Amino acid sequence: MADLTSKFCGISSPNPFWLASAPPTDKEYNVRRAFDAGWGGVVWKTLGMEGAPIVNVNGPRYGAIWGADRRLLGLNNIELITDRPLEINLEEMARVKKDFPDRALIASVMVPCEEPCWKEIIPRIAETGVDGFELNFGCPHGMSERGMGSAVGQVPDYIEMVTAWVKNATALPVIVKLTPNITNIIHPATAAKAGGADAVSLINTITSITSVDLETMAPEPMIDGKGTAGGYCGPAVKPIALNMVAQIARTDATKGLPISGIGGVTTWRDAAEFMALGAGNVQVCTAAMTYGFAIIDELTSGLALWMDDRGYKRVDDFIGNAVPNVTDWQYLNLNYTAKARIDQDLCIGCGRCYAACEDTSHQAISMTKDRIFEVIDAECVACNLCVNVCPVEDCITMETLAPGTTDPRTGVKIPKEHGDWTSHPNNPNAK
């Protein structure tokens, strides 16, 4: 079986699956259960300074978005960093690391944007034996109002400054956790690199309001008739996270900077996608909160089986392999042509493809009185909408037209080589 051993910016773990800094990593009891279950690493829930008490709400802390089958798609939380005493956390971290020396134990930290605060707490945490630090520059609620969290993560100069402070205070690896609540993720990533960060992790949660109670007219989760924006995570944020990871992996200014991928990792396939786009490992939170720590068995076994099937011996063999295939729109090959195809043996006659195409797309699907649906090639632009709305997997697929044939929609002959687009006169970047 494939070797899942991971070494992320010098930190070793038996597999690339870490638990993200969140409620599942708030105390020794949880972390021990996680390590007993087989998780490769844990980012301990964010630690703060002594003398700055954290008081969480004693009421609902989570809002949710569900799919039609009530499967949890997105989770919004308004919980703050750990409200447990720093000294208790440090004692527990030391015991856990002593008993699980082969697992990655990372300390997430958030203190005021003042150098003495960081210089004081970092060495204290290092004494526990932790393998590294994650600087929490991402929390979008509660702490940002105090000048921490995303209030720092949205200002590249602050990111560089604080990262440099921490690097001067420790020889351990420093991971900078980035907020997605920003226009261009490259700016904070570049700042983290300039400050000496050994890696970045992303994404942190997205500022959100998931719903409004129309009886009380207050956002959920509601505390005594009031609500507030919180941090959104779970499967629904995965596309946003994948894009930001890919941007960092393919941009010259940040290329080569190790990335810990976060954002909706629920299955081994999700993890493989993050890693194919350049993440050296992944962090998981919502999936563990939904299904429990035992999901690590499916994550590790699924990834190992896929790697065996693909001939990958180690996780490093496929990390970043998809990055060269991520490009800007202007470089897409406009000579490439495909058409939708409906498998009549699989079609259940629901008509969703027809309704979608007829009402909102290109009127490229016909329907007979007997509810037989066929693609009209002369109208089909291969937009893929019919594939996405069809409830039967593989009933509708896209067929690439062979080079040299004529596109029935445009009457234009497809070039013998799809790659001819690089020199096509309509290509704005043609040489």
Image (spheres, helix red, strand yellow):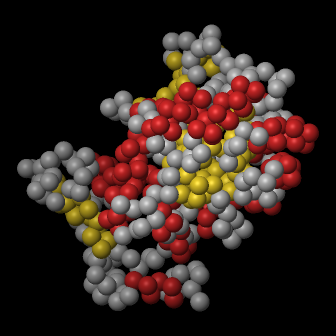
Q: Where is residue 231 in the image (x, y as percent from the top left)?
A: 61, 34
Residue farthest to the front, as pictured = 99
In the rendered image, which quarter contains the N terminus?
bottom left
- Residue 205 screen position, x and y as percent: 61, 39
- Identify the residue at horizontal 48%, vertical 62% (top origin): 315
Q: Nearer the viewer, residue 172 or 58?
A: 172
User: Which residue lies at the image location 28% right of the left edge and 77% below the top edge?
Assistant: 401
Q: In this view, does 429 lie to the left or right of 85?
A: left
Left or right, residue 180 beside residue 422: right
Residue 308 versus residue 126 in the image, above or below: below
Q: Give residue 243's quadrant in the image.
A: bottom right
Res. 222 image quadrant: top right
Residue at 61% x, 28% y is: 27
Location of residue 397 in the rendering, given as x and y in whole percent from the top left corner: 26, 62
Quadrant placement of the C terminus = bottom right
Does 168 appear above or below 20? below
Outermost residue to the top = 224
Res 323 visible: yes
Taking the spot 61% from the left edge, 57% from the top edge, the residue there is: 8
Residue 294 coordinates in the image, percent (x, y): 40, 37
43 relative position to 355: left or right: right
Residue 327 found in image quarter? bottom right
Q: Nearer the viewer, residue 20 or 89?
A: 89
Q: Can residue 229 be seen in this view?
A: no
Outermost residue, right side: 116
